Amino acid sequence: MKRLLKGGRVVDPVNRRDGMFDLLIDGERIARVGKDLEADGQTVVVPVPTGLVITPGLIDMHVHLREPGQEHKETVATGTAAAVAGGFTAVACMPNTSPVNDNAGVTEYILKKAADAGLARVYPIGAVSRGQNGEQLADIAELRQAGCVAVTDDGRPVATALLMRRALEYTQMFGMPVIEHCEEPTLKADGVAHEGFHASTLGLRGIPGEAESIMALRDVSLAELTGGVVHIAHMSARQTLDAVRYGKHRGVRVTCEVTPHHFVLTDEYLGSPVPYDTNTKMNPPLREAADRDAMLQGIADGSVDVIATDHAPHHYDEKQVEFDRAPFGITGLETAVSLCFDRLVHGGVISLSRLIELLAVNPARILRLTGGSLSEGAPADISILAPDLRVTVSVAAMRSRSKNTPFGGWSLRGGVVATIVGGRGVYLNKEFQDLRMSGYEDFRI
Amino acid sequence: MRKDLLGIGDLSRDEIYRILDTADAMREIGERPIKKVPTLRGKTVVNLFYEPSTRTRTSFEIAEKRLSADTLNIAVASSSVQKGETLADTAMNIEAMSPDMIVLRHASSGACHLLARICRSRIINAGDGMHEHPTQALLDAYTIRQHKKTIRGLKVAIVGDLLHSRVLRSNVLLLTKLGADVWVCGPPTLVPAGIERLGVRVSTSVEEAIADADVVMMLRIQQERMQGAYFPSLREYFNLFGMTVERVSRAKPDVIIMHPGPMNRGVEIASEVADGPYSVVLEQVANGVAVRMAVLYLLAGGVEDEAAA
């Protein structure tokens, strides 16, 4: 079956397209992109309302799907339902499941669950070390063979410089990046919030930005030593961004990501509007305004490669506790696009085209995935976005099994209209039912 | 009056003065032969203590009994918290029995905020982690006012473990609100980041901090919170920061020395100072009852005039 999307603004940085184009989908693939394409007899024409944008499917390279082992927080099915509702056609999931994804069995289990769900594509990320214990390398070739696209001990840093060195050397055989959760454990100690004025007045134990940047500098140095590829996950501190810039300046193969909450929120939210709201507790912590501004600057000047959510679902009961006892992390898949539009595009930080680089092109490049473009012949992974849609974040309507977000009730400008994976409509925003009437009857909601 | 007393940070200057003025009337009750008024008759107050406390818990209990409230003490051993029910569940269970107020002491900062969100009962913070201990600061202010008439313009030096102290945070907020010139002093390892933004002067020299001070407030070295190596030894700490008679002589002649207790004699304070003529430590304890009566009374919806009756 062929479908012709007519009338949208196509933003496809890889093919240097940003303008009004028609897009012909033939089965699972993009057949043609061009001006004023004609529909033949078998083609269903889908008129795209004015003001909408058609982009390569967005890819979130840092999510926690929690399955296997923590299905009370999230499953692959609920997590990918959240992903497509958030405009993401693919997610890369972290290995800190129970058991840890350090062997082919777990990887295959995740991929089977993803196939059963049939929503977003799922790219598992394997552990660097067996059990994420930081002692012995996991069977990385086996993980690669089973479908892992990178390795990380996310949730904790790769424990020692020696093990990180080995990982950066070993993974070069497979062209896989090592993704690092930067955190110097002794400096972080039992900290629960950014070390600064707000943590001090609230009586919360602090985590200085240097706990992150020290580890980032270590890894940049080791990547230089080994020629390996390191990707710095969820940066929060301005010093970390400087460490990445230093590495890039020296030609080190280092890339980095920042989460929406780290470029939107600051540690001021620890105390207001809801004091000690455990949905402001994440690792790395919300930092001060200077750090938030540095992240925006890094996004604007190209130092930041990727926006990823670090979607970290936790059950209500786990968050409904004293601040220092609550687990770190918030959900992110269903708020990311709106936050990016509102703060980055409408905020005048970057262009829409640059946003698509951060959300699709660069994650695909770093993880060596096929997505990230609307090239003819590529899988039809497409996000349809509404830059000017007024969105009020509704926690109750979220598809993630967990509702731990600090953004409930926020009014934002920009949202998701529809998500297409492999030519199949997997999400359609209720406000755009007309699209379904005109040919996308297979949209699942 | 507001629903809860969670911290000095929430209180206006007028509210603080109202509590201190009410405490005056309450103090008089404690001096009567029959130290009991019917003000809170029929009200139930639960003292929910997750941390061991002698002084604060006793003080609240006496205050409650003098106001004729029905009181109930629940001491939760910290060891059972790990496997036991959550604070939220405990709170909802207590709430189901319709108490009027819950006095909470807890090791986690913000625990009382969690309770306040869940419970209709009024919550009084009797110390939450490293955050606040508002009734301590109120009784300290009451004691200072007794001796100095006013708080505005006084030089107050607070010396000790600033980092882990909820007494520090509450006192800084209260004393700066009332216009005191507040100095805080301790080793740099125990100074909270950004504390100067609260309008205090930070010094690592105890001599500088207490020079010409009207009030010196000592903070306990909380050995149970000293997992990290914040200073080399108690001996070195005492040599640098311990309050000795010699150091006290640098303050104003009519200086008062305060300590929230329990004191570590020979660690943060020399016995000669703790027991010396300028020490008001036991007055603080006595005033604690009056101030807590005032807080209980005002939160229960009272009016000053009735209290004196």
Image (cartoon, rainbow, N blue to C red):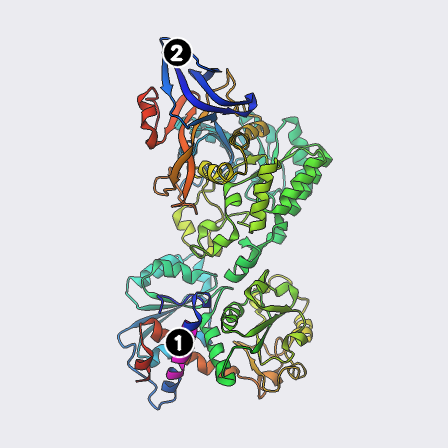
Q: Secondary structure at mark 1?
A: helix
State whether residue B185 is above or below residue A283: below
State which chain disc 1 sits on: B
Q: Which residue is mark 2?
A: A39
| Res B238 visible | no
Give how far across and how far down residue A150 sits, in percent: 58, 32
The amino acid marked with disc number 2 is Ala
Q: What secondary structure do most residues of the magenta stretch adopt? A: helix
**In x, y percent, where is residue A200?**
55, 60
Q: Chain of mark 2?
A: A
User: Which region of the structure is painted magenta?
Assistant: B15-25
Q: Quadrant of residue A67?
A: top left
Q: Point out the residue furthest to the left here.
A: B42
The secondary element bearing badge 2 is classed as loop
Disc 1 marks a residue whose amino acid type is Arg
Residue A4 at least partly seen = yes
